[in-house]
Image: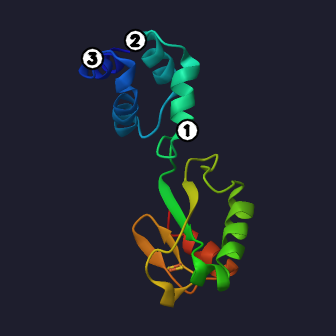
């Protein structure tokens, strides 16, 4: 792909530029597509496995696209004590995903976080930029309906 070649050239076609190359690709696509990884490897003349190994080592890189909405379930101490893990269980069950995954329909990506700074509202779930507090397993499913 031509746009990948441009990015690789920007970093001197050197393996030492692999991290910024992957960052640029992810900035454009939102994740690291399989064909992008093989193109990068070909351009740098290195094994695809080396690119994958770096892409999977750093949590910041994603190999699958993100959902239209991000759900961050707080599992910090206050939220955990007040049922955060139960909320995560319910979301995983209802949406058919594990933490870190995206739903089949591309609607949600579910992840856990450690304290989002409003412990008084525990347990808290942040969807996109919206904070939802004092949730329980039933309420969280109601809240999801607002996000198509
Ligand atoms: S522990 Fe969840 S907001 Fe602080």
Residue designated by label 3: 12
Of the two numbered discs 1 and 2 on the same chain, state the one appearing first in sequence. Answer: 2
Residue designated by label 1: 57
The residue carrying pointer 2 sits among few (fewer than 14), some (14 to 19) or many (20 or more) residues within 10 Å by Cα, namely some
Q: Is mark 1 within 8 Å of ligand 1?
A: no
- Tell me residue 53's x, y (percent): 57, 29
- Tell me residue 120's x, y (percent): 49, 90
In-front residue for pair 31/140: 31
Query: Relative to 124, does residue 52 appear above or below in the rendering?
Result: above
Q: Quadrant of residue 48?
A: top right
The residue carrying pointer 1 sits among few (fewer than 14), some (14 to 19) or many (20 or more) residues within 10 Å by Cα, namely few
Q: Residue furthest front?
A: 16
Q: Quadrant of residue 124?
A: bottom right
The Cα atoms of the two marked residues, 1 and 2, are separated by 21 Å
In-front residue for pair 95/133: 133
- Whether residue 64 appears in this view of the structure is no
Q: Using residue 46 as the reference point, say whether residue 85 is left or right of it.
A: right
């Amino acid at each position: 792909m031509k746009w990948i070649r441009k990015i690789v050239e920007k970093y001197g076609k050197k393996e030492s530029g692999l991290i910024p190359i992957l960052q640029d690709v992810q900035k454009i696509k939102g994740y690291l597509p399989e064909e992008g990884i093989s193109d990068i490897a070909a351009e740098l003349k290195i094994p695809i496995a080396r690119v994958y190994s770096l892409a999977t080592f750093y949590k910041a890189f994603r190999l699958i696209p993100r959902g239209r909405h991000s759900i961050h379930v707080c599992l910090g101490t206050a939220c955990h004590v007040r049922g955060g893990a139960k909320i995560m269980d319910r979301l995983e069950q209802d949406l058919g995903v594990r933490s870190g995954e995206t739903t089949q329909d591309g609607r949600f990506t579910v992840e856990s976080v450690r304290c989002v700074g409003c412990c008084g509202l525990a347990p808290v779930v942040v969807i996109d930029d919206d904070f939802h507090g004092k949730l329980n397993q039933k309420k969280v499913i109601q809240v999801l309906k607002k996000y198509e």
